[in-house]
Amino acid sequence: MTAPVDHAAVGLSATEALRVRVQRGDGVADYVVPRRANQTVLDVVTEIQRDQDPTLAYRFACRVGMCGSCGMTVNGRPRWTCRTRVAAVAPDGVLTLEPLRNLPVVKDLAVDMEPFFEKWRRAHGYFEPGENPPDDFATVAPSSPARQEVDAGIECINCGVCYAACDLVTWNPDYLGPAALNRAWTLVNDVRDRDRDRLVAVAGDAGCHSCHSHMSCTEHCPKGLSPTFSIAGLKRETGKAALRRFWRRG
Ligand code: SF4
Ligand code: SF4
Ligand code: FES
């Protein structure tokens, strides 16, 4: 598939033009877009959709690195596109855009995040206040070890970039994946949370012990989080919980 772009009419020199190849369904489409100062990858996709091809599908919302909806594969690497500058990732003026890996494609660059969030549910990645939560605010010292563990993982924006970067998810689609496990770890360390089954939920065959610790999630996370570190914490705590169960039985 080729986009309806008139290259001659664009009239740009090689240094002014950005050549963009976009995965669309089973084919690709090629576009030429003017290079601009401080241009982001999301700017490029938006310009194509508005000026050249309104049928191009992609997703974004905030444009400022908060909502986590603009993830794509950019020149072979998963990235958030609203905060990725073209100059940093395509110095030669060539951009290849594909949907995020490891998720079903809805259309073009838009993926279905349902399997990703289903794993958050499986990992009990939600706060459980218990039957009778206290009326008053809980006091949690910022310097407490548990609070610091939470702080290290809490800024996740659910972008799915780590999930797309994880080869284990590719090999085993049942694997809970780095984001859901990172979220579970923040809740394990939340002193207000009353879920007693979360460690069991993350310890199964497709859980934290499957992780190969090869750090791809940590390397790609745009928020600078380390799901690998969180998963190591879960491995430790699930191991201790299994031992406690064993000694209780004995
Ligand atoms: S460290 Fe674990 S979760 Fe992260 S990319 Fe590797 S296998 Fe996946
Ligand atoms: S851990 Fe990082 S890469 Fe993974 S979903 Fe959260 S913000 Fe995105
Ligand atoms: S559009 Fe919201 S994080 Fe990129």
Image (tube, rainbow, N blue to C red):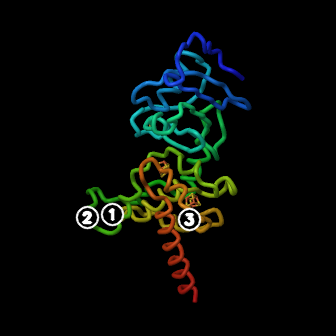
The alpha-carbon separation of the residues under discs 2 and 3 comes to: 30 Å
Q: Which residue is mark 2?
A: 141
**Mark carried by residue 229:** none
Among the two numbered marks 2 and 1 on one chain, the one whose residue lies closer to the N terminus = 2
Q: Residue at x 29, y 68 (%)?
A: 144
Q: Residue furthest top?
A: 9
Q: Residue furthest right?
A: 26
Disc 2 to disc 1: CB gap under 8 Å: yes
Label 2 Cα crowd, 10 Å radius (few <14 / some 14-19 / many 20+): few
Q: Position of residue 28 (x, y in %)?
A: 69, 29
* Residue 72 on image: x %, y %: 56, 38
**Amino acid at pointer 1:** Arg
As measured in the structure, the alpha-carbon distance from the residue carrying label 2 to the one carrying label 1 is 7 Å
* Quadrant of the rendering where the C terminus is positioned: bottom right
Look at discs 1 and 3 and give the one toward the viewer: 3
Label 3: few (<14), some or many (≥20) within 10 Å? Answer: some
Q: Quick check: is the Cβ at mark 3 less than 8 Å away from ligand 1?
A: yes
Secondary structure under tag 2 reads loop
| Whether residue 55 is situated above or below residue 154 in the rendered picture | above
Q: Nearer the viewer, residue 127 or 157?
A: 157
Nearer mark to the viewer, of 2 and 3: 3
Q: Residue 128, located in which quarter of the rendered image?
A: bottom left
The three-letter amino acid code for the residue at tag 2 is: Ala
Which residue is nearer to you in this view: 94 or 186? Answer: 94
131 left or right of 31 in image: left
Q: Amino acid at mark 3?
A: Ser
Mark toward the start of the polypeptide (2 vs 3): 2
**Horizontal and vertical percent position of residue 129:** 40, 58
Q: Which residue is mark 3?
A: 213
Residue on which the image places disc 1:
147
Q: Quadrant of residue 22?
A: top right
User: Mark 1 and 3 residues: CB-CB less than 8 Å, in contact?
Assistant: no
